[in-house]
Amino acid sequence: MIEVQDVYKTFGENEVLKGITANFQPGKTNLIIGGSGSGKTTLLKCIVGLHEPTKGEVILDGENFTHMNFEQRVPIRTQIGMLFQNSALFDSMTVEQNIMFPLNLFTDQSKSEKLDRANFCLERVNLAGKNKLYPSELSGGMKKRVGIARAISMQPKYLFVDEPNSGLDPLTSILIDELIAELTQEYSITTVVVTHDMNSVMGIGDHIIFLYQGKKWWEGSNKEIAKTDNKELNDFVFASPFMRAAKEKL
Amino acid sequence: MFHSLGKYILLLRLSFKKPEKFSVYWSEIMREMVSVGIGSLGIVAIISLFIGAVATIQTAFQLISDFIPKTVVGGITRDSTILEFSPTITALVLAGRVGSAMASQIGTMRVTEQIDALEIMGVNAPGYLISPKIIAGVTMIPLLVIISVCLGLTGGYIACAASQDVSTNDYLRGLTDGFNPVIATVCCVKAVSFGFVITSICSYQGFYVNGGSLEVGQSATRGVVWSCIMILFCDLIISRLLL
């Protein structure tokens, strides 16, 4: 379980996060939603340790991640998988080398074992046989799937996903969402997804946190979100005429 | 200024932490060595041949008289090539070729979140990205400088053979007469220092890029400019201390 306790984050004079407290359970797809500039990505980066919170703590399965130094964080980081907004695949490496990279550094597996694991991960994201392609030869959706394959290669306990649907067509977006939800349940991973895609919210949001102006404004599930009377959340989720019409039919 | 210097020193300290797995780092070192060494061989060879030839022609133009032995031309060409032309000009050229490539490679990795991806995995990103480049720089740039010296002196020989201002026999005798081994030591010290300066400064500039492709380009430019300034500064300090 991931516990975020009263996290503040300030950049210069700009206070981006204002006392966020939240728990993320394993085996559930946890979503952080909110408008642009609401602090979603900053919160995610505070959780994974790319930003140090100005105040507050992040606890991963009872271990206080915030106050650890680099060496202490390494064993926990090997249990973290992350899919970045632009996939962040290593350009100079093939798909296979990208997936095997963490295995090369942090395991003592033989080359054939690592290759088997890479092939398994690629099959799991429906990209079997694409081992020798370079990131520049992949489409946006394929890059995301390779990013997921790399993220799960070390069998992580925690999976963090930043804007998995950005730049993807609706069909590919749904496939990526379904893949994330399947992996979360299959391996009982604690998954945290930052998104503002309403299909993701309604489709895979087991547990949703809505951020507004740096504060946690609402918390619930995708079933509860349609019935909420929270004005800011309603303005955000049902901003389009299509979503408003869909809500009226519910 | 002092803030940047502090960040630079801290980055270097992080770069030389114990590697997660030596074999992975070793393959990176080999890759960088090929990139720095083999990749720069062509440009270094061309520049060295021409510089050696020009140095010989100009020295001959200034010194040929009935009162000065013609072997002096070979000696001056040798000393100036070993002490100054080969290490310094090779380093300035490599700052442009190798340094800008390193700064933009690391900078692009920063803006496309590849460095964040390394850190999330638990990899010491400065160690994985910067230390192989510095090791490649301090090993391959001295080798390139040695090749540059040989080709520079060969360029001088070709110039003598072509112009007949100085006979090739006089030139060769000048090269071997009164050779002081200290100049070879100074040349090697300069080459190692310049290798470190180019790779560390350009890597630093790339590592702390903030923004997008425009800033990556600016970081590469800053890396080359600062490398050139520091190469000339180190050149002065080493010459003053060792000669």
Image: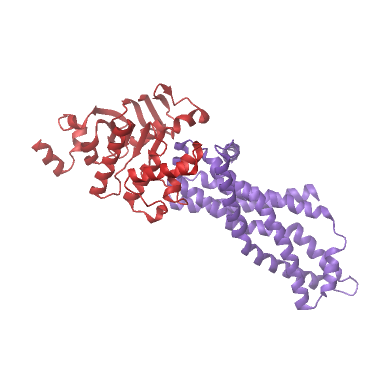
Q: Is residue B119 left or right of residue A228?
A: right
Task: Quadrant for the N terminus of chain B, please.
Answer: top right
Q: Position of residue B120 (x, y in %)?
A: 44, 37
Instruction: Give me the residue at 62% from left, 56% from top.
Output: B37
Q: Nearer the viewer, residue B232 or B188?
A: B188
Q: Position of residue B34 (x, y in %)?
A: 59, 55
Residue B211 seen in render: no
Q: Residue furthest left?
A: A249
Q: Position of residue B117 (x, y in %)?
A: 44, 41
Q: Position of residue A130 (x, y in %)?
A: 38, 52
Q: Is residue B127 left or right of residue A130?
A: right
Quarter-of-image position of residue B187: bottom right
* In the rendered image, the vertical position of residue B27 relative to residue A13, given as above or below: below
Q: Is residue A63 left or right of residue A170?
A: right
* In the rendered image, the vertical position of residue B11 relative to residue A66, given as above or below: below
Instruction: Give me the residue at 78% from left, 47% from top.
Output: B241
Instruction: Give me the residue at 65% from left, 62% from top.
Output: B44
Query: Which shade is chain B?
Result: purple
Q: Residue furthest right?
A: B67
Q: Nearer the viewer, residue B214 or A244?
A: A244
Q: Is residue A162 left or right of residue B82?
A: left
Residue A45 seen in render: yes
Query: Which shade is chain A?
Result: red
Q: Nearer the viewer, residue A27 or A82?
A: A27
